[in-house]
Amino acid sequence: MSAWRTTETDSIKEYVENAGGEFIVKDAGGDIATQESDIRDLVAAGVDYLVVAPLENNGLQGAFTGSNGKQYPGYPG
């Protein structure tokens, strides 16, 4: 993970934990299929927020299906 990504992740983690939330990190290791699977798992688990750094500009739309109508900011699903 790059230095700026580490800083970004640490900043988000600190904010979430200070607000009393649980912070979960998934790393797809550069694999778009793994990233899609990770997102599907988190959506199925009912997380309140997702912060996604897409590996590609297309291909993750299907990961948000099955969200039972739950809307995630930034995703027009």
Image (cartoon, grey):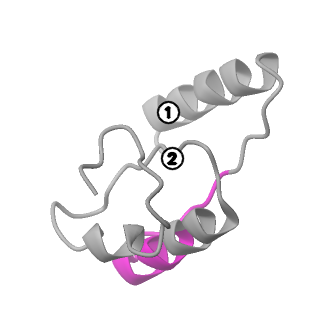
Can I make out residue 65 in this image? yes
Give how far across and how far down residue 27 sits, in percent: 56, 62
Q: Which residue is mark 2?
A: 50
Q: Quadrant of residue 62?
A: bottom left
Q: Quadrant of residue 6?
A: top right
Alpha carbon distance from label 1 to label 2: 21 Å
9 above or below 61? above
Image-based side of 69 in relation to 41, left or right: left
Residue 3: mark in rendering: 1
Q: Earlier in the sequence, mark 1 or mark 2?
A: 1
Q: Amino acid at mark 1?
A: Ala
Assess disc 2: are there few (<14), some (14-19) or many (≥20) residues with their C-alpha within 10 Å of its C-alpha.
Answer: some
Instruction: Report the magenta residues as a range.
Output: 25-38
Q: Which corner quadrant holds the C terminus?
A: bottom left
Q: Secondary structure at mark 2?
A: loop
Q: Residue at x 41, y 48 (%)?
A: 71
Image-based side of 14 in relation to 4, left or right: right
Assess disc 1: are there few (<14), some (14-19) or many (≥20) residues with their C-alpha within 10 Å of its C-alpha.
Answer: few
